[in-house]
Each structure stands twice: as C-alpha cells, then as structure tokens.
Image (tube, rainbow, N blue to C red):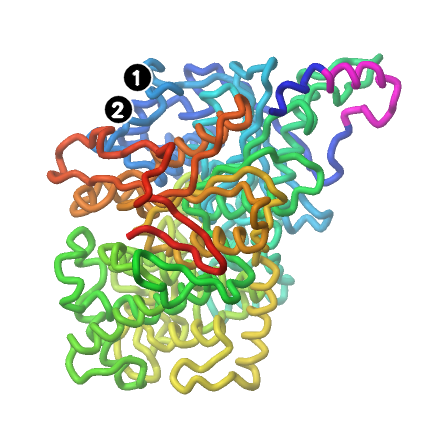
Amino acid sequence: MRLLFTGFALLLSACNSNDSLNENIRPSWLGSVSKTSLDGNSNDLLTAGLGKSGLSLALQAYANPNQPTATELRRAAIYNNYRALVDISSSGGYGRLYGPNIDISCNDTLGEGKIAGDEYLAYSDDGSGKQNVTLMVQIPSSFNKSTPCVITATSSGSRGVYGAIAASGEWALKHGCAVAYADKGSGIGIHDLSSDTVNQIDGLRVSRSLNNGHFSADLSPAELVDFNSQYPYRLASKHSHSQQNPEKDWGKNTLRAVEFAFWLLNEKYGSLQGDTRLADFANPASVTVIAASASNGGGAALAAAEQDSKGLIDGVAVSEPQVQPFTTGNLNIRQGAATMPSIGKPLIDYFTLANLYQPCAVQSARLSGANSAFGSAVSATLGSARCASLAAKGLVNGSTLEAQASDAYSKLIAAGWLAEGDALHASHYGLSATLGVALTYINAYGRFSVKDNICGYSYAFSNASGDITAPNSVSLAGIFGNGNGVPPTAGISIINNLSVGIAKADAFSISASTNTADYNIDGAICLRKLATGLNPQTGAALTGNEKLLADRVASGLKEVQLSAKLQGKPAIIVAGRSDTLIPVNHAARAYYALNQASEGSASKLRYIEVTNGQHFDSFLALSGFPTRFIPLHVYAGRVLDAMWAHLTTGAALPDSQLVRTTPRTVATDNLNISALPAIASPVATGDAIRFSGTTLTIPQ
C-alpha cells in the first residue's frame, strides 16, 4: 500500500532539504533530452492526433514520401504500432470493448480519446555511442499528483519506442499515470550500407558521416567498400547486427526508463531549494510503479523485476511474455491428464525447429481447414518440396507427402506446441515471422556482424521475382513509421546469398544441397545447428568453425535467461493457450513453474491462461480467425486493473486460473463481453491452476 506513505516521504524530504543527496541528479547514462508538448487536439500522446476514428482508417500519405517530417513519422509509428497489437475492427471489439474512447470503467465516454501532455525522448548509452537505447516518457496533463504512478511500456517484439503504446501505454495514460517507454536497444535502426545512411532517434534519415544515428554497422570505411562490392544493396538491422546482444539488457533498460521518469517528474514537480531542484516528489516510496507490456516487453518487465535492486517496481502485469527461464530442471507441466513432452526451451531452439518443419507440416491433412486465412501464405509447391528434402536428409519419415507432413507436424507437437495453435503455423511461417525471428536472434546472441552473413543470409530489397534491387528510397525514408525491427519488414527481404546461380529472396532461392526450391532447407539446417550445437541429421556435436559459431550463440543465450525469482513482488502473467509464436509450454507456463519451485510460499506471482487467445490480435480482423480466437488485449487490461487494485487498495490478487472464452460463431457478428468471462474470484475447482512438488497442473 505504497501510497499511504507518500506524505511521510515528502516530510522526510523537507526535513532533509539541506542534504545534497536529495538533489534531483540527472542520470549519468542519459543523453540529451527533447521535449514535445501536445495539445490533445491537433496532436496527442496516445493517437498522434488521429483519435479513435483515425486509427481505424487508412493513414494519410506523407506530404513528401521521400522526406517525411518527424511529426509524420511519429504519427505513422503510433498508427502502425497501435494496429499491430489490437484488432481494429468494430465487430471484434474496437470502439466498443476497448480503444481510445473507452474509459477505465469500460464505458464509451472519451470521444476520440486524445490525451494532452508532454513527451520526452532521449538515448541511454554506456558511453560508447553504440547502444543508443531509446527511452521515452509521456506525462499526461491529467497526471495525478496526489497519487503519482508510473507504468512501463517497454516495446513488444523488436519494435521502436512506440511499440507498446496500445498495451500498457494506453492503460497508463487513461489512469493519469506517466508512461516509461524503452525500445530495449533494438527498435527501428536500419543502416543502408550502399548509401551509408541511418535513422536518427526521431526516425529521420541522415548520412552516417553527419550522425551515427540510432544504429550503424561497425564497419570501417575500407570494410564498407569491400562489403558493398561483394554484396551490393544490402542493409544492416540493429537487433540483428548491433553486436550488443540487446536482450541481455532488457531489464536494465526498463529500470532506466523508470529512473528517467522519476527524474523528469522531479524536474516538473519537485520543490526548489535556491536554484537546486530537489528529488522530493518522485522516489520509490512515493510513486506506484507497475512494470507492464506484452511479448518481448513483457519479458523485459519480468527481467526488470528480477534485477530491481533499488525497489523501483511495486508490481508486474504482463501479457504473453517472451521469457526464457534458465532451467526447468525436473519440473513437469500437465494439461489435463497429459504431461507436456517439452517445456522451457530457449526461443532459438523452438524457433529454429519451427523454421525447419512448419512449411512441411502445414501440408498435412491433419491441419486441413485450419489455415483458411493464410492457406496460400505457405506455397503448396515449396512446402511439398521442403517435405521431400527433409525426407531425403532423414529428418522426417514417410514415402508420401501426407506421411512426411504428418511426421513434421508430430515433431512440432512433440516439441511443445499445442494443438490449439494449429491454425497459426501457416501464417507464422508464410509471413516470415518464424524465419525472421530465428535469424535475428541467432545473429544477436552470437554478436555477429552484418559482414558475417551468418548461414548465408543477408537483408536487401527485392522485386516480385525475388531478385535483389537497389534500396527503395521511399520505404527507407518512412521505415521508422512502417517497420517492426525484424526483417522482412517495410519491403526489406531476407536474402539467401548461397542460392544456386545468384542470390535471391529466401522463398525464391534454390538450395545448393538439393538443387531445389524448398524454402532454403540449407539455411534452416544451418540455423538449427547454431541454435543447438548439434547436427540435426546425425545428432552429433558440431566441430570446427561450426562449433565456434554455435558456442558464441550459446554464450549469448546464457546472458538472457532469467531466474524467475521476482523478489516476492506481486506479479500477474496472462497468456493465450493458442499462442503459436511464443508457446506457453516454453515461456509463460515454464516461467511460472520455475518461480513456484524457486520462491515457494513467498511467491506472489499469479498465472492466468486464456483459452482461444493467441499472440497477434491484429489477425482477428482477417478471414478464418474471428471464429477461432478472441482478443487477448482485453485480458492484458484486466490484469493491469487487478494489479492496480492490489497496490492501491489492498485488494487480493486473483488466484492462478484458466479462463474459458467463446469465439464468435459468425465472423461478422459483434464479439460480446459475455464471450470474455472475467478473471474469477473465487476460482471454480475445475479452472484452478495448481503447482505441487515439481508439477504445474493446468486444467484441460
């Protein structure tokens, strides 16, 4: 009940006003700070002036597509990031169950939902000028000085600093809280190596000779010339090629965002002693802080809570976290009567496995009808060829396509995916999320340079035939607003440099070992090797240079795995059972189980699993998905509500439980709130999630 001590904390500050330690000291790692004041009409913190209506419509084109302004890029970034996390259709709930117009009591009272206030932007860095983690703090005009609060909104995925604005950012602004954002050291940093141009913190592109920008590849002038001569028109991406392994600092970045917010709040509201601003308004004793976000941002919030040595964070409320426990030891997870065959695997393990088997698995009759929305996303021709190549290399069994595809699907299930996520394998592979993430994280963990071309991959623009083209100037100019940080994005393709004949976009390439267009099985096997340190065909340990590369990846992986020890902080994780991108057996369930085993009765972590919830709510506006899935976004808001009530009123945390939802029967029908049951208290016996001994039991 932190807020009860606010007055006492301020009294202590006043009594010690001559103590130099009470000066509001600017953090040493903080770069120059820019401030933008937004009137809540022409421009605002939440919707960039678009309002609830504008977010649901097509975005107006840039006045000059080759030179968009910083204001236009910010508007596009907010527009695209908001829509990336939320189903924007009215039938799905936008504007009725959630959205800028919906108030904190779930009523439609806020009109267009624009929120006035101040926005502050700065880099955090280690002094090298290479980290350049973007931090942002929004302080709404409605900030509640009597009960001050800060909510973190670390970006989801590899997105830029606005990546979590639709998740915890919106919740915080509506509650009169400041929002502490971080892009986690990834973000939209694209270095066009041929023109040697980079993004600045505001998205504008400049020559690297003028400004190293948000990210530039660590290449000397001679190396750049040599690389461009061998690999023309290539690009470097910050998350892949910064050689910083940014994930290791996600927790630190989140904590620094909170400290940035505290410093700004003291600059704004702290008292003056002569010319000295005091840190007597915002401190750990006076401000309620909730670490929150979704996906990678959720993992960052959990990491921050584990690493919080200053008592900055009061509680955690995260959705579908990408989190990697360092071990699951002898732990078990049961769903109903079935023991899960694989749990707690690292992200690069399950992503490289999916990258190998998904395009074949979706050809199976066992998934017939499950991929209606993206049935053409995975080419039947290329997928069948992948099956044949897998069989030829002894990686699947069967002499027919159906037998091979069925075996590939069985391998996914044995590796920890749930049948509830069957409908998503085609979309995840076909839209290149699987390969894009696998390649990004192998590069990041191994701290590989763009010049390493790991597994023969690079990034470039390509045409409809898969041929590499010169960078698209319009796409590059607008990439801050349109990109997501993980190629393929905004027209940038993943290239197979080792394609037979000539380098091609991966899906168009010819594998050297099979002389076949099979979605580049050679690259998939190479990534799998580096992720596991083993040859997937023989099971033998790697040797020589392959082992050296795999050892680098393994070393980077160790830097990012978490202990699941939350220091007894109250925390809630909500995840969708049907999540096929970040399977719950490897992330949310495994982390919760390790926490229960590690902290025991001292744990205040709760786990809410939601049936029919999956990773990308934006898919719910597409054919085939509304009748299978529900918006997990609603439950992300509910766990924030629950944590807020716990911290401010002493309300009990909800017990861990399974929430059973009901997708629409007809896709065009309005989703009703009755289909999204509340998080229960008390929990029905048949819905309770329990941990005992070494086993986590989830109801069927």
Residue at (41% x, 87% y) in the render: 538
In magenta stretch: residue 453: no
Name the mark on residue 108.
1
Q: Which residues are magenta?
A: 8-24
Magenta run includes residue 12: yes
Residue type highlighted by circle 2: Arg
Front residue of 200 and 422: 422
What is the CA distance from the residue labelled 1 to the residue labelled 2?
Answer: 7 Å
Q: Main secondary structure of the magenta part?
A: helix
Give the residue at x 65% y 32%. Answer: 260
Q: Which residue is mark 2?
A: 96
Which residue lies at the image location 31% right of the left edge and 72% below the top edge? 411
State the image coordinates of residue 596 (x, y, percent, origin top left): 52, 51
Q: Are dots 1 and 2 in contact, CB under 8 Å?
A: yes
- Residue 631 drawn at (x, y percent): 29, 38
Q: Amino acid at mark 1?
A: Asp
